[in-house]
Amino acid sequence: NGRFSIIDVIGTGGMGRVYKAIQSPLDRIVALKVLNPSYGQGGRDPNFQRRFFLEASLTAKLRSPNTITVHDYGKTDDGIFYIAMEYVEGQTLAQVLSANGPLPWIRVLHIGQQICRSLREAHKAGIIHRDLKPANVMLLSEEADQDLVKVLDFGLVKLVGTDEPEITQAGMMLGSPLYMAPEQARHIADARSDIYSLGVLMYQALMGRPPFMAKESVDAIVKHLSQKPPRFAEVRPDLAVPAEIEAVVMKCLEKDPDRRYQSMDELLEGMRAAASSQGVSGLFGDPRGITTGVRPALTAPQSAAAASPLPPPLPTPPPGDGDAARTRAERSAPSPRVGSGVTPAPAEQSLALDLVEEVPRPGRKYLLAAAFAGSIVVGASIVLVLNRPSTPTQARLAPPPPPLAAPPERAVEPPPPAPTPAPEPVRFRVVTEPAGARVMMGDRPLGTAPVEFEIPAGENGIAEATLSLSLDGYVPLTLTARGAGPTVTVNQKLVRKRTSVGGRKARETKSTDDGYKDDPY
């Protein structure tokens, strides 16, 4: 259409081709995805055009630095759909895993938390990815970050179908069924489906393979529906992945969506807690800058200082020298030296090694002076003992004082009963079909679905809220949500308003009530 000049082919798949192109008149390099002409004919999916423009317009509004930017989209005069996206140079996670195998767990968390932030923004906008997999995650290498994540194909993969052949990387099966949540096989998906797919992705990044392997798509889907993912030790016993990290992945892979993390924020918090248990703190902004709490090794390699013989132990002071002798022994004991290879056993392991400043040891002449002063003190004490007048051998003992009468015992008052804790508030999660409905409680706006909010619970632990749902082009609805915590999910399908066009066929390019346009131009 005159707005793009093709430079080169980046990739080819069942859904179409991706080109490196220049966008005019901005002279900007973009990645131009051109879908197969069959998608514009309407025979394969009559509603494709409607959903393409609606979801493309929503995706173009995402601004997360971990989400690929959509610059333009549309349909050519001859019926071909295209999307112009941000052009980046890097490798997909599928390519990295194919070349390197399993990744260190700290690197996997660094990648995973960036995917969480990308999907968090998308979920709040009512967009579910539905096809998260290593081939849709780009890793860029920049000065500030070795693994800057860019998530691709938001919301559009569902439109082109999940049964299409995919680009295969070096013998690896990258078909969507390997990463599909169990409920997606039943054509049900919400934000928690992306959490399951992210769990599969992290499992593969840690173990070098997905939890379920199958040559046929149907066999993979059956395993997701019926089998538990194998434990890490069963797949790769040679890899030391902490149990806390494995627990995060396994919670993502729960068959029941209610038993998974309920949001990307919850998953992010789970990652941070697991990392903290291993002495890793911070937001993992850069793997090169991560604080890894180094624990002292039980057996340290001997250095030159450690190989040298230790000084002989100090002689035990004779009886009578008292604290003075002990003080001299303590002061003359050598201080531990950092890096000498001799690590004193700490009472409790810490996440950081403390540097101990060495106390200067006294010189030889000061030691001689101290010894000389000590001998004078000892001699003086001997003279005092010899000149002390003798005391009688027996002394008259005074009669013991009469025992004091014990005060009467006071009655111990029982502690006041502990106050009954107030019931925990109940978190409600409202999901509408289609997404984007405005949710209000009385005059208080709560946001657009999917949305979460908390309602105080009564004494019986049950919370109740009367909600109003409204979306342009759909019949407004008022409902009462009621339930006990910690989380209650309300799924509501909206009914479209009936409109009349006066018996005439509406123009294809006319705007509809739900805000999408067939052609943004």
Image: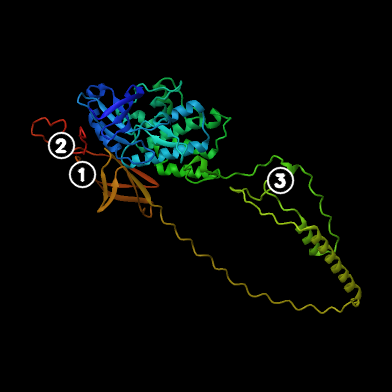
> What kind of residue is marked 2?
Arg
Mark 2 vs mark 3: give the one in front: 3
Mark linked to residue 51: none
Give the quadrant of residue 165.
top left
Given residues 439 and 265, the one toward you in this image is 265
Vertical side of 338 occupied by 104: above or below = above
Residue 486 position in % (x across, y down): 40, 47
> What kind of residue is marked 1?
Pro
In three-dimensional space, the C-alpha distance between marks 1 and 3, rounded to whole angstroms, equals 74 Å
Residue 127 position in % (x across, y down): 32, 37
Residue 271 visible, this orientation: yes
Mark linked to residue 498: 2
Q: Regarding mark 1 in the picture, which secondary structure is present there? A: loop
Mark closest to the chain's N terminus, 1 or 3: 3
In three-dimensional space, the C-alpha distance between marks 2 and 3, rounded to whole angstroms, equals 82 Å
User: At 43% from the left edge and 23% from the top edge, which residue is drawn?
Assistant: 169
